[in-house]
Amino acid sequence: MLRFRQTRNMNPKSLRTFVVAASWLVAPMAAQGADSAAPAGNAAEGAQKVQMCQGCHGIPGWRTAFPEVYSVPKIAGQHAAYLEKALHEYRDGERSHPSMRAIAASLTDKDIANLAAYYGQTGLAATVR
């Protein structure tokens, strides 16, 4: 049986070491659960819907001026589960960027899964057609 010292008796360095070690053990399990819970999209079908994304996300170094000037994030090669979650949050109003909310509002759950699968491909390079 494993016995752990109570955290109130641990010095800050030991506590920090314990927390870091615990996170190294838990993080892979959490990531595996998140990946298995995400519905699989079809990257080939997602490739047919990227026109609305490429106007901003497909141009290296692109900056947008609406609603304010900022660098547009590169989404090619991003984790599919993250992209899918972000698109759902835009569609559901949990994220506030007006352009992204408008685009996401037009997407079905299947469209979102397919776009996430397309952009989540490893080694995908963003290109403008």
Image (cartoon, rainbow, N blue to C red):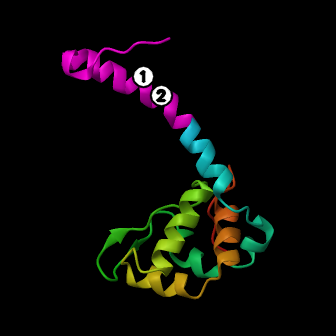
Where is residue 44 drawn, in percent x and y? 80, 68
Tell me the residue at 35%/26% (across/down).
Answer: 19
Asked which quadrant contains residue 51, the reply is bottom right
> Label 2 vs label 1: CA separation?
5 Å
| Disc sitting over residue 68 in the figure | none
Q: Which residue is mark 2?
A: 24
Tell me the residue at 40%/12% (across/down).
Answer: 3
**Amino acid identity at mark 2:** Trp
Q: Nearer the viewer, residue 38 or 7?
A: 7
Asked which quadrant contains residue 126, the reply is bottom right
**Amino acid identity at mark 1:** Ala
Where is residue 50 drawn, in percent x and y? 66, 76
Where is residue 57 drawn, in percent x and y? 53, 69
Query: Could you tell me how many numbered marks the image carries?
Result: 2
Q: Magenta span has 66?
A: no
Indicate the secondary structure of the residue bearing disc 1.
helix
Indicate the secondary structure of the residue bearing disc 2.
helix
| Region in magenta | 1-28
**2 and 1 marks in contact (CB < 8 Å):** yes
Quadrant of the drawing holding the C terminus: bottom right
Would you place residue 88 above or below residue 8 in this image? below
Q: Magenta span has 14?
A: yes
Tell me the residue at 48%/28% (across/down).
Answer: 24
Would you place residue 67 above or below residue 25 in this image? below
How dense is the environment of label 2, judged by Cα within 10 Å: few (below 14), some, or many (20 and up)?
A: few
Q: Which residue is mark 1?
A: 21
Would you place residue 16 above or below residue 58 in this image? above
- Name the main secondary structure of what is drawn in magenta: helix
